Amino acid sequence: MEVDNAPAALGSQISLNILQTIRTAQTQNGLKHGDYGRYRIYCARRLRSLYKALKFQHGKGRYQKRKLEIGMITEARWLLIPLVSAERAWAQGMEIKKDNEDRPLQHRRHHSIRRLTKASAWAAELARFAAEVCDTRSALEAEAYSAWMAGNVLLEKEVDWGRALAHFARAKKLFGELAKVGDLDSQGLCGAMVEEIEPSIRFCDYQIKRGGGAASDAADLLAGLGGGEGDGEGGARGLLQSKLAALQAEAQVQQSAATSSFEWRGQSHPVRVALHSARELAVALEASGGEGMEVDGGAEEGGGADARLAAFDRAINALAEARAAVRALAKANAAGDGGGESALEELAALEKAISGALLERTLQRGEEQVERAEARFEAANARAAAGKRGAGRQERGAKPEDLLRMHETLMHHCEELGELASSMGGRQGEALSDVAAARGAAYAAGRCYYVAHTYLAGDKRPEAAALFGRCAEGRVEEAREKLEDLPKLEAAARSALPRLSALAAKANAWRLVAAAEAAAEAAAAGEDARRGIAGIGLDTQAGGGTRYLSEGLDTWEAYGGTGSGKGARLCAVPFPLQAAPGRPIMLDTAASGVEYPSLAHRLRAKKAAAAAASQGTSTFARIFGWGTSSGGAK
């Protein structure tokens, strides 16, 4: 009928944010403090008001149940009827379960299971309606909600752990995909649901292993819920993938219409500033992959790698400018020119996301540089082993000191990424911290390898051999363990595993080289000492005959000669003549030895003064010789 088809066509545009509606109601009506009874009463009142507003009442006098049909759904309020009914039954079941914890009674447990089963039935009804009349996001959200409810029922019944695990795995998969699209609030709610489901999955897995079974793969669990929706497991899996693909397509359409979010590590953050250039450059880098970006046909060899490094530079600069703009906007909001605390929180989250993306791009650029420098270093070693020299500038080998500094820089960036993870907190921060620690351990292994090469180049062969051994047996193994513990989604970090295996092989080879050179050097030194000691004796005399004891105190050589006294070389007799410098005649030391003539006869002023003094002496003084000089007495 046309009447039945028209609402469905209109309903295909209906959008209902199920999680946000539920969380808001739960927070405002008791569940913030664990009061399930208050929340159940609220759901009952809300359900009555919906029945009255939608004129969906069940008779004025005697109760006459009316069934909700798809053709009746013309707006989102009709979908609230099964949603609120499911929440009311769930709240009552949880209330009974909580009361039964103090005094366990069997009939209370059965009553709680019946109410949870009713909630699961209402949730399945909601999922069926949403699949017909809602958009893709609302339909997937309703399906995830229904799977979560079904898993809760089986978890309480404790009869089919495998099917409960399958329902929880499906809900986790759907909520995880929903967390990648939408606004910040929806992303946070879906992420919280994923964290809430995770303990239930671990508990079901534990019960399965306890019963002697084996944990099933996630793909098998999702395929096992296909039922009659597809042709076996492949049909169910394909149906789920098609729904998720449709959700991604809708998200891309919305994003292309208005760029309002920035995505980093699976989370979207609202954008208050333009990030178009950074986004376009990131897409170009992802498209280029590990093969280098396309360049003009006339570019010289190596131009692809140079173009890729230039693209990294542009992307890093764009992200740095975006971060500066976000910080400026956050500063303006903090001064009272923005939208309050919510805007500040969004800007803080966006700044962390941009900083993380900036650090990851910087690490990728550093890895590109290290890869090119390592290639030149290995090529130079190969030429040196073959006895050749580089013909041009392009063949100039990299020094181990340069590679050492590059690895230290990468380790510093990993430390900054770990600090960012600590500031984020939560499961996302823990995952990022593990990634930063694993990548830092890989860079530390490379640093140890090139420190050993630095010692080897400085002729410190025993130290180099010890460092090569530490790299191969300690640093590489530690980094490999950390990288293997990362989830498979961290493909960028796990891509270092093949490089670590190659690094361990090279370190073992160079350890043998350094140990062999150290052994050869020690053997040569021992041979020199043996020869020197063998030349010491009274009956033997080392050749030469021109060196004496005073000139060879640091050598293993005998200077005493034979018993007859011949050949002794204690000192040279007669002593060899040596040139002696003459005494200077124009220096201060020479002038002090010169005796100059007296000039006393030219001092007339002194004689006149002496005569005046003698005339001024009294007669009495002259009688007794007072006042006369020794010269006058004479």
Image (spheres, rainbow, N blue to C red):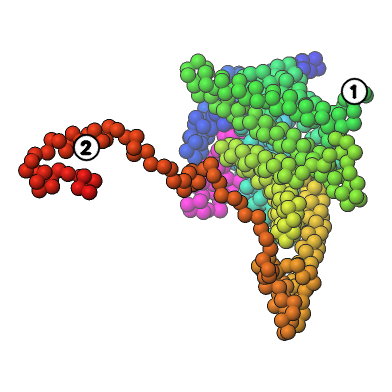
Q: In this rendering, would 596 be left or right of 138? A: left
Amino acid carrying mark 1 in the image: Asp
Amino acid carrying mark 2 in the image: Ala
Q: Nearer the viewer, residue 115 or 101?
A: 101
Label 1's element?
loop
Question: Residue 126 location, x and y as percent?
Answer: 68, 30
Vertical placement of residue 143 versus 134, above or below: below
Residue in the picture at 22% in, 49% down: 634
Residue in the picture at 74% in, 59% down: 461
Quarter holding residue 377: top right
Tag nearer the camera, 2 or 1: 2
Q: Nearer the viewer, residue 20 or 351?
A: 351
Q: In this rendering, would 429 be left or right of 567? A: left
- Which numbered dot is residue 353? none
- Which segment did they paint magenta? 86-113
- For the image, the number of numbered tags is 2
Measured Cα–Cα span from mark 2 to mark 1: 112 Å
Q: Quadrant of the N terminus?
A: top right
Residue in the picture at 67% in, 43% down: 408
Residue matched to label 2: 610
Question: Looking at the image, which residue sits at the far left?
Answer: 620
Is 99 within the magenta? yes
Label 2's element?
helix
Q: In this rendering, would 464 be left or right of 82? A: right
Question: Residue 538 location, x and y as percent?
Answer: 72, 82
Q: In this rendering, would 599 be left or right of 58? A: left
Question: Looking at the image, which residue sits at the far front?
Answer: 634
- Which numbered dot is residue 296? 1
Q: Nearer the viewer, residue 396 or 169?
A: 396
> Can see residue 25?
yes
Question: Residue 128 location, x and y as percent?
Answer: 73, 30
